[in-house]
Image: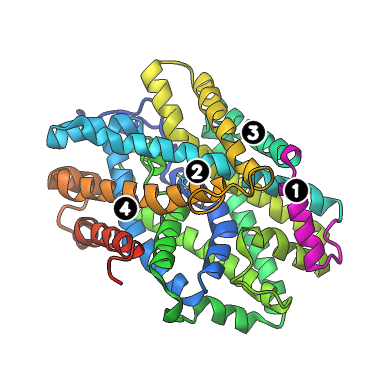
Amino acid sequence: MTDGTSGGERRTSLHGFWSSRFTFILAVTGAAVGLGNIWKFPYIAGQNGGGAFVLVYLLCVFGIGLPIMMSEILIGRRGRRNPIATMQLLGEEESGSRAWGLVGVMGVMGGFLILSYYSVIAGWTMAYVVKALSGAFAGASPEALSDQLDGLRGSVLQSGFWHTLFMGITVSLVALGVERGLERAVTFMVPALVVIMLILLGYSVTSGQFGAGLEFMFQPDFSRLTGDSILAAMGQAFFTLSVGMGSVMAYGAYLPQETSITRTSIAVVSADTAIAILAGMVIFPIILSNGLDPTQAGMGLIFKTLPLAFGTMTGGVVFGPLFFLLLGFAALTSAISLMEPAVAWVVERWHISRASAAITVGSVVYILGFATVLSFNVLSGFTFWQGTLFADIDYLTANIMLPLGGLFITVFAGWVMCRNSTADELDEHAGPTYRIWRFLAQYIAPAAVVVVFLNSIGVFD
Ligand code: PFF
């Protein structure tokens, strides 16, 4: 652990520091890479027609997500507190208003809501490890695989059991403190996941529909782009990078002063994008070669499609369980980051131990999670706004709360914080990278979020 400071008057973290820049990259990459890349990206891209969606998604990731990630880290490091306290503190320092703390409050609430459903889906990946091990995929037809998923999510007991297990593991890890366990898990997990994906890529290359899969993903058909699909692309960019809700801000608070925020952010964003694209390159050819329609597959996609591949490929009995296990790990490192803002806040606010804070936060999230568990069985017919309760929570968080949080964060970093403060953190006063960041943070990112919002409610139609 370093002391993380270089100047005498700087604040210091209350929860320790990352031991190196590399560790921080791993932690933020662990937070970023998760179900969003492998489960959500392919099915949302599929639902929104592929190519054009992917293009908008990439523009959002690099043009909006990257500058916001830099803003979030720099705010976090400057404040060195939990996201609520940091926003209050810097708000007061930079503009005389503590009301900026509300941005942190929204982030903490967003984390609760996202984690509540994230845990349920992550629970399914654990259930799939067991299914894969028991040979349930061997030679199974698409219909049989679809029934398997429906059996799992249709049962309150089964789905609830795996949700309980996943939340239990997440809470234990957060309670123990993340430094050793998590840093090690991530060091192993991210490379291993990439290796498995490459092996699957080998399978999908030989599936006979590789070209068609690539075409679906990369050939833009702009007639398919609606206001809502552009909003979905932007929401997915925020979700996949974990920006807009304070997770990255909380992690930034533990970042040693000398680490370059720019280079770190670029590394994380590139790794995250690479994994999502890789997932698409694996999944779409397999869907097409089985005569399925990627635009109709929906959120059950990876649970129905990849098992098809595992059921027929050589070594599928080994790669199947391993794949879902690693996906579970990827989800775990994201889940931990989803809890961090709330846990850090509870610890700082009520001066209770990290373990008690983790159990308190975890319990609330756990109970909320049953809204999602029940969305696939007892309450599946109950539609309120976008669909089931799960669909509502997903839409509200990814498409509204994260972009809104990101908007406030970038406006705060670009306009409210004085130039000296941000230049100081980015440590590149007049350099071109600083100027590019400031331009994106001041103009492009806020304008893009506003335009996408307006477009999705039909203002430009
Ligand atoms: N980025 C994670 C994923 O792609 O699965 C999900 C996530 C984690 C979103 C942490 C938001 C967050 F704060």
Q: Earlier in the sequence, mark 3 or mark 1?
A: 1
Residue identified by numbered label 3: 169
Location of residue 387 in the rendering, given as x and y in whole percent from the top left corner: 54, 53
Question: Viewed as shown, does residue 2 lie left or right of 116?
Answer: left
Quadrant placement of the N terminus: top left
**152 inside magenta stretch:** yes
Compared with 33, 336 (above or below) is above
- What kind of element bears circle 1? helix
Residue identified by numbered label 2: 114
Badge 1 local density, few (<14 within 10 Å), some, or many (20+)?
some
Instruction: Name the residue type under label 1.
Output: Leu
Instruction: Name the residue type under label 2.
Output: Ile
How far is the residue under mark 4 from the one under mark 2? 19 Å
Q: Earlier in the sequence, mark 2 or mark 3?
A: 2
Q: Residue at x 38, y 67 (%)?
A: 227
| Residue extent of the magenta highlight | 136-157
Instruction: Name the residue type under label 3.
Output: Ile
Q: Residue at x 45, y 16 (%)?
A: 352
How far is the residue under mark 4 from the one under mark 1? 38 Å
How far is the residue under mark 2 from the one under mark 3? 17 Å
Q: Main secondary structure of the magenta part?
A: helix
